[in-house]
Amino acid sequence: KNEVEQSPQNLTAQEGEFITINCSYSVGISALHWLQQHPGGGIVSLFMLSSGKKKHGRLIATINIQEKHSSLHITASHPRDSAVYICAVGGGGSNYKLTFGKGTLLTVNP
Amino acid sequence: EPEVTQTPSHQVTQMGQEVILRCVPISNHLYFYWYRQILGQKVEFLVSFYNNEISEKSEIFDDQFSVERPDGSNFTLKIRSTKLEDSAMYFCASKYGYYEQYFGPGTRLTVT
């Protein structure tokens, strides 16, 4: 059973700051997902990673398979980035289920 | 952009009643999932479905739960006799292959 740990649990930043959210997992995986959940509950997929680094706009996600660790970075944070960011992992074939972390609540103040 | 849809957005039911939560996955997707999130807790896997059968189910997914893809477009989760502890947000997700999962907006189930 994979254990997914995220840190920090809560993060408050000022607009423009560089944000880092960390995720570690206990068992080897096929892929790691970063998800965003806004108040009201909907989940949006940000990244799916199996190695290296991906960038989308101001968001960057990295993964170190050997260390079983991933980071999500937000550059030039904005109040609209305020949300819960969730790390989820899956393993074994195409039809893998996701195991979720508890999420990091990010609040960006203007 | 194609999206996963779920209905209803909010369902209130009495304990012991049957509920059916509906999802319309993205049309060419092959793999389908139900997850749930109890208020304040992390998202948990319930069941995966592929090729018209359950691929994997969690310990939560007991005999009170069932899933169906009745017509090739809808994907439903049925809870036969709801309990108070079934109150949660239920998310449907789908994906094509070894790609990211797309989540629906969720159905908030309240059991009174």
Image (tube, rainbow, N blue to C red):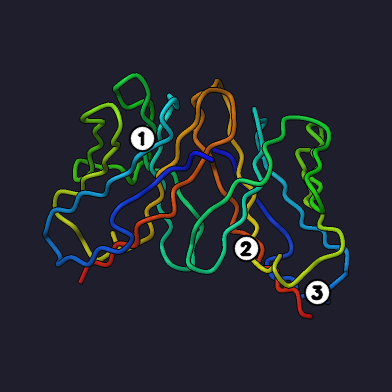
Name the residue: 30% across, 31% down: B73
Locate residue B61: give its quadrant: top left
Name the residue: 53% across, 53% down: A43
**Marks 2 & 3, CB-CB < 8 Å contact:** no
Q: Is residue B89 above or below residue A53?
A: below
Name the residue: 44% across, 40% down: B93
Q: Is residue B65 above or below residue B68?
A: below
Same chain for marks 3 and 1? no
Same chain for marks 2 and 3? yes
Amino acid type assigned to the residue bearing label 3 in the image:
Ala
- Disc number at residue A52? none
Q: CA–CA distance between discs 2 and 3?
A: 14 Å
- The N terminus of chain A: image quadrant: top right
Residue topped by disc 3: A13
Q: CA–CA distance between discs 1 and 2?
A: 26 Å
> Element under label 3?
strand
